[in-house]
Image (tube, rainbow, N blue to C red):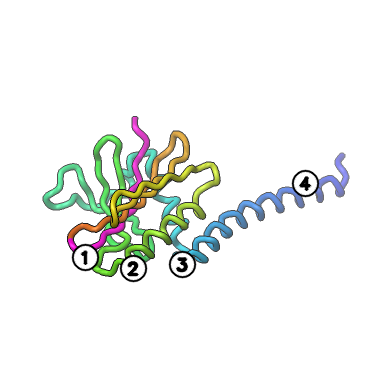
């Protein structure tokens, strides 16, 4: 027969472990919020990362008109625009984060999203940045054998800026 003290300790340890796990998720969200992102950013990002393993099939909406092997994405990032699922190899999920003519807004969307990726993803993920010209930069985040994520900012025409988040599923 176990003593009630041993049972109490086990309950306390289990409670502490569950609380720590919940706190870790909340702290990711709080750090992302401090970077200027919506509290819903981390959970939405996790949904995209989790869906990569199945090629984003659960996130496929209606087929894109004029597109081949493309669907509307059903999961949007808070504050972002439309999303698209590409069914190639590897499949990809892309969301527009900013489209407009104000360079500072494009830079802000890019910087906030890069900070959000670093805050929302586990510490084992690695980040690399590539700057290609004056108005083109890409930050890629990878986590081993899982998907890769890229935040892409570019000047698409004159003073028209586009910032997107791409989630590429692992190659099969």
The answer to whether the residue labelled 4 contacts the one labelled 1, judged by CB atoms less than 8 Å apart, is: no
Label 3: element kind: loop
Tell me which numbered mark, 3 or 4, is placed earlier along the sequence. Answer: 4
Is 154 located above or below residue 125 in the figure? below
Q: Cα distance, mark 4 to mark 2?
A: 51 Å
**Residue that label 1 marks:** 159
Q: For residue 105, which numbered disc appears in the image?
A: 2
Q: Judge left or right: residue 112 versus residue 55.
A: right
In primary-sequence order, the first of circles 1 and 2 is 2
Q: Disc 3 to disc 4, how far (Cα)?
A: 39 Å
Q: Label 3: few (<14), some or many (≥20) within 10 Å?
A: some
Q: Main secondary structure of the magenta part?
A: strand
* Residue ID at (37%, 59%): 110
The quadrant in which the C terminus is found is top left
Q: Is residue 89 magenta?
A: no
Residue 130 in percent (x, y) is at 36, 46
Q: Which residue is mark 3?
A: 36
At x 34% / y 56%, what residue is drawn? 75
Q: From this viewpoint, which residue is outermost toward the top?
A: 172
Task: Give the camera-side residue of 149 and 107.
Answer: 107
**Disc 4 packing (10 Å; few <14; some 14–19; many ≥20):** few
**Which span is picked out in magenta?**
158-172
Residue 104 lies, in percent from the top left, at 34, 68
Residue beneath label 4, please? 10
Marks 3 & 4, CB-CB < 8 Å contact? no
Identify the residue at horizontal 37%, vertical 42% (top origin): 52
Q: CA distance from mark 1 to mark 2?
A: 12 Å
Q: Pick whichever of labels 4 and 1 is earlier in the sequence.
A: 4
Between disc 1 and disc 3, the foreground one is: 1
């Amino acid at each position: 027969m176990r003593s009630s003290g041993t049972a109490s300790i086990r309950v306390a340890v289990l409670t502490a472990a569950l609380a720590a796990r919940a706190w870790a998720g909340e702290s990711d969200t709080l750090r992302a919020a401090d970077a200027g992102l919506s509290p819903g950013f981390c959970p939405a990002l996790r949904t995209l990362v989790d869906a990569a393993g199945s090629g984003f099939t659960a996130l496929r909406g209606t087929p894109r008109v004029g597109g081949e092997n493309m669907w509307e994405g059903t999961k949007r990032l808070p504050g972002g625009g439309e999303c698209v699922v590409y069914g190639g190899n590897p499949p990809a999920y892309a969301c527009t984060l900013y489209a407009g003519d104000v360079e500072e807004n494009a830079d802000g969307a890019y910087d906030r999203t890069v900070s959000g990726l670093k805050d929302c993803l586990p510490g084992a993920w690695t980040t690399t940045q590539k700057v290609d010209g004056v108005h083109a930069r890409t930050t890629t985040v990878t986590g081993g054998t899982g998907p890769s994520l890229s935040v892409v900012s570019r000047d698409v025409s004159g003073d028209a800026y586009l910032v997107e988040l791409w989630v590429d599923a692992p190659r099969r």
